Structure formats: C-alpha cells, structure tokens
Image: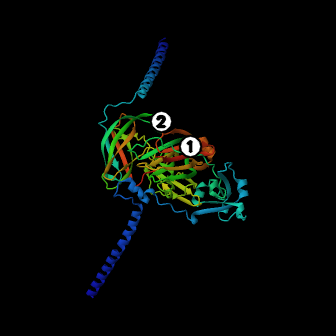
C-alpha cells in the first residue's frame, strides 16, 4: 500500500514537472514574440541600422477599430437636418433629437434622402449637453454624418527652404508657431482635421512629426499632440495622438492608425473634470479609433497651442519632401467649472475670436510651417524636406 | 488750551507718520525697481551642485560628466526677445549596450530645497529636451534654466525611450 502511494506521488510529481516543462517554453515563446515585436535592435548603435527595423517607425501598435457594439448609428432625413441644424457653420451640426431615435430609426426614407450619424456611443454620450433624458443635444463636426461631409478648401502649400546648412552634431530640427487663448473660458478639448498631404523620397532615412501640441495648465507638464508622422517609406505614414503627463510621454497610450497619403483624418480630444482625457480619430474609411488616459492632476485649461514641424535625421544625402496640409483646429470644447460642470463645443468662428498668434520660433534647416487663421479656424501647413 | 495744543500735536504727529510712511514706501519702490533693472550676474557657479536622476530606463547606465554652468541669454516661447538664463552644459554617458532616446529637463533649487527655476527650452514639447545617446557612448547637451541667483542645486531628470519622442 505504501509502495502504491509512493508510486502515485512520484507519478503526480512527474506530471507536474512535465506540465511545467511543456508550458514554460510556450509562455516564453509568447513573451519573446511580444518582446520582439516592440524591440529595436540594440546590438548596433548606428541610427541608420535602427531605421532599417520596421518597428522603428511604429512607436505604437496601430489601434483597433472601434467595434460595432460600441458604435451608435442614427439615420436622419436630409430635410430634417436642414431644418433643425442650429449652427450656420457648414462644418458643424448642432441638433437636438428625441433619444428614442437611438433605438429605432427616425426615418424610413430611401437612403439617398438620408444621412447617417455614425460615432462611438461614448463620444455621443460625452457630447450630449441635454439634461432631458428624452432628448439628445449635440454639436458635432459635419464629418461625423456620413454623406454630409463638407470638403475643406485646399490651401496652397509652400515648399520648404533648404538653403541653410545642416549642423553636423544635431539630429533634431524643429520649428514652432505658438498660439495662446484669451482669458475667460477654460478650453478642455479640440477637434479638427489632419491630412498627410504630400510624400516624395528618393532614399533618405528620416522620421518627421508634423503636429499640433496642446499645452495644459495646472497639472504640470501635461500636453496632448495630434501627429502626422512620415518615415522613410510612404507606407509608414501615420496619424496618431501622443499624451504627455507631468512631463512624461505616455507610451502605453494608443490611439493612431496608418493612413494613405492624401487621406483626411478627423480628430478630437477632451479632458473631463474627473481627470480622463479621451482621444478619437475618424479615418477616411469611416473607421473610428479611441483611447483614454487618466491623470490625477489633469489640466483644467489648454492654454497654449503650437503647430510644430520636427524632423529627426542623421545625414541628409537624398531628396525628400513631406507635407501635412491642413492640420487644423476647427472647434474647441469649453468648460465652466464647479459646482455645475458644463461642456460646450464651440465652432470655428469661436476659434478665430478666442485664439491669438503669440510667437514663432526662429527658422531652422529642413523644416517649415505657416498658419492660416480665419473664421474657418486655425490651420497649419507643415513641411519637412531637403534638396541635395 | 492744553486740549487744543494736544490735539494739534496729535494731528501733527499723524501727518508726520503718514508722510514718513509715504516717503518710506517711495523708497521701497525705488529699491525694487533698481533690483529689477539690474542685469543678473553671478561670478561663481562652482558651488552649484548638479545631480542626475534617471528613471529605470536607462537608470544607472546613464551618467553625467563635463558639467559646466554659466550665464547666458535664451529666446523662447515665453521670452521671444530674450532673457537671462542659467546655462548648463554637460555630457551624458550611456554605459548600456543599446541606444536610448533620452528625454530630459532640469529644475533649480535654493538652499532650503524649494524649486525656484525650471527648463526654458523646448525639445519634443515645451520644457523638455531630447538627445540620442549612442550605445556605450556619449553625447553633449545644453539646458537653459530660468535665471535665479539663489540656485544652489540643479537636478537633471532623464528618461529613455526606444524611439524619438514626438
């Protein structure tokens, strides 16, 4: 009996060992796969070698599309929108509709006479400013309504001035245009368009960030960036958000996607009173992407906005030119504070009234930017390039 | 009569005191103005302690050398016309067998440990700078700090990333 017990115990131990031995490599392999996915080669310090690694150009894994279950789609008749849209700005729709329409379609009209609001449910909930549960009041970009899209007029792009000489010991070249906002409302979010517009490259290795930086006040070095990113191949063009919290770049934050050059991507972000920043992207194929980040000392006001052209390049030996036009702010979210928090989205005319150009950093080689500041909002035309 | 005299004395005293106060106030204003318009200057920066605080990556693999502090002029977002700054030049030494993109900034503290100075430069964002530190190699850096005569310690904070921060 004792012998049988021993044999049983030995068998059990063997089974446990076997399971451990068999499982460990599986776990390790999975970990290795994840590790390799994000790994930049460390054996060769040369930047050119690092740039050969495709992951070099992918500081994020492209975000998953917002799943259908998290989307809200409401079909409106075009006539109803035309009559009920309170916002004269063609880029914005300001409507109030019965909340029952969220569950049952309000119209049985043929599709050609309708337009469809198609947004993440979370975004719609956050935009709803109505206290009445029986209705929904929202101010949204026209782009969020499929088939109501209004084309933004194209602005002429200026080619970069490459006359200046490269300083050999520097890798980063950057230029910024700064805008501030007048005191009064607190600005807690922004929305607009990013269009990575032009790409030519005859073999230069580089990484270009063309972006608007939104700086928060009251929470340390907090910032949100909407970025049009170009790399050494046209296929590495991306639009994505970066979030900085207390001066640290939050690399786990993931809201971005690869795009075709020429595509327009809509973006919006906002920070609520509880400390969460929500970022959304809508690509040219009507796919939505989002992520959120919690900060226990969030900015209560985005006080400064900078168009920024940044390029990292070692040694320029080939012609290249990349351009984002426009990257724009078309609307701003304003917030009144305690005791009754009220979030409102303001139109492009408000952007023009409340922002002002404050300064531009000195010109630098290989980068250029200018701005168009009108009642249609604030747009930057941002370039990087070289002629050898 | 005595009462009248006492009252006059009291009124006179009040007038004198008030006048004196006004005079004193004017003097204070003049003194403050003088301080503001004086160009900051400090002959010796060798007594300023400089410390590096590097986060887990690159952590202890990153060290400082060749640190030199001097007075300079910085033009940036907050002062496009230029302002006096405390310039910290130095070298980052990376002992790791891999390259890091290091985002860094500095803060200045007085003798009692209060923060009185911050980074003026803009790299990837306002107030942050970035360099590429080669594997087992070095790279020079420059930081412009908000000027203060009372800085007794500068702490440089650094954090490494796989890719250049946007």
Q: CA distance from mark 1 to mark 2?
A: 18 Å
Residue reaching furthest bottom? A1
Q: Are marks 1 and 2 in contact (CB under 8 Å)?
A: no
The numbered dot on residue B125 is none
Q: Secondary structure at mark 2?
A: loop
Tell me which corner region of the image, top left, top right, bottom left or bottom right, holds residue B13: top left
Q: Is residue B114 visible?
A: no
**Label 2: how many residues lie within 10 Å, few (<14), some (14-19) or many (20+)?**
some
- Seen from the viewer's position, the closer of residues B11 and B78 is B78
Marker count (numbered): 2
Q: Looking at the image, which is closer to me, A268 or A375?
A: A375
Which quadrant of the figure has residue B115? Answer: top left
Instruction: Please provide percent x and percent y for residue A28.
Output: 36, 69
Residue A22 is left or right of residue A132, and the answer is left
Which-is-in-front pick, marks 1 and 2? 1
Say few, some or many: other residues with alpha carbon within 10 Å of mark 1 (under 14 / 14 to 19 / 20 or more).
some
Identified at 59% across, 63% down, the residue is: A71
The residue pinned by badge 2 equals: B80
**Image quadrant in which you'd find residue A15:** bottom left
As drawn, the label of residue A371 is: 1
- Name the residue rendered at 38%, 34% in the picture: B72
**Residue B138, percent across and down?**
32, 48
| Residue A10 visible in the shown view | yes
């Amino acid at each position: 009996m004792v012998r049988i017990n021993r044999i049983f115990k030995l068998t059990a131990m063997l089974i446990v060992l076997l399971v451990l031995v068999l499982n460990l490599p599986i776990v390790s392999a999975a970990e290795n796969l994840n590790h390799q996915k994000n790994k930049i080669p460390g054996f060769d310090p040369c930047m050119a070698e690092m740039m050969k690694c495709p992951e070099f150009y992918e500081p994020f894994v492209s975000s998953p599309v917002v799943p259908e279950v998290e989307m809200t789609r409401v079909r409106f008749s075009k006539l109803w929108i035309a009559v009920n849209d309170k916002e004269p700005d063609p880029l914005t729709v300001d409507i109030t509709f019965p909340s029952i329409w969220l569950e049952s379609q309000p119209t049985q009209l043929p599709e050609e006479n309708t337009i469809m609001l198609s947004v993440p449910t979370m975004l719609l909930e956050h935009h709803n400013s109505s206290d009445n549960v029986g209705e929904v009041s929202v101010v949204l970009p026209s782009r969020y309504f499929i088939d109501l899209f209004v084309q933004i007029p194209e602005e002429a792009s200026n080619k970069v001035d490459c006359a200046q000489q490269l300083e050999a010991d520097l890798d980063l070249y950057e230029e910024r245009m700064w805008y501030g906002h007048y005191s009064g409302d607190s600005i807690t979010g922004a929305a607009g368009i990013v269009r990575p517009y032009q790409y030519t490259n005859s073999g230069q290795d580089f990484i270009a960030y063309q972006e608007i930086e939104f700086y928060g006040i009251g929470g340390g070095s907090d910032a949100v960036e909407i970025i049009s990113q170009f790399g050494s191949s046209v296929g590495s063009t991306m639009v994505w958000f970066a979030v900085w919290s207390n001066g640290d770049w939050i690399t786990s934050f993931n809201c971005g996607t690869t795009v075709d050059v020429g595509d327009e991507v809509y973006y919006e972000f906002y920070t609520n009173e509880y400390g969460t920043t929500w970022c959304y992207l809508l690509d040219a194929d009507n796919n939505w992407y989002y992520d959120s980040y919690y900060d226990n000392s969030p900015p209560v006001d985005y006080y400064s906005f900078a168009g920024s052209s940044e390029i990292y390049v070692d040694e320029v030996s080939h012609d290249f030119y990349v351009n984002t036009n426009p990257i724009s702010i078309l609307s701003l979210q304003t917030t009144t504070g305690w005791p009754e928090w009220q979030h409102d989205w303001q139109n492009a005319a408000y952007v023009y009234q409340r922002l002002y150009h404050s300064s531009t950093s000195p010109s630098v080689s290989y980068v250029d930017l200018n701005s168009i500041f009108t009642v249609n909002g604030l747009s930057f035309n941002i370039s990087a390039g070289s002629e050898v | 009569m005595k009462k009248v005299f006492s009252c006059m004395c009291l009124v006179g005293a009040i007038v004198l005191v008030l006048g004196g106060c006004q005079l004193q106030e004017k003097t204070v204003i003049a003194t403050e103005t003088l301080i503001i318009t004086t160009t900051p200057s400090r002959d010796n920066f060798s007594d300023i302690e400089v410390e590096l605080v590097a986060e887990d990556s690159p952590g202890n693999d990153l060290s400082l050398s060749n640190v030199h502090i001097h007075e300079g002029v910085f033009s940036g977002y907050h002062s496009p016309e230029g302002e006096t700054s405390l310039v910290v030049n130095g070298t980052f030494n990376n002992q790791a067998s891999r390259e890091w993109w290091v985002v860094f900034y500095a803060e200045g503290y007085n003798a009692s440990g209060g923060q009185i100075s911050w980074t003026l430069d803009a790299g990837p964002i306002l107030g942050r700078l970035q360099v590429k530190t080669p594997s087992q190699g070095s790279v020079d850096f420059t930081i412009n700090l908000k000027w203060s005569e009372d800085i007794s310690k500068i702490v440089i904070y650094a954090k490494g990333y796989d890719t250049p921060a946007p």
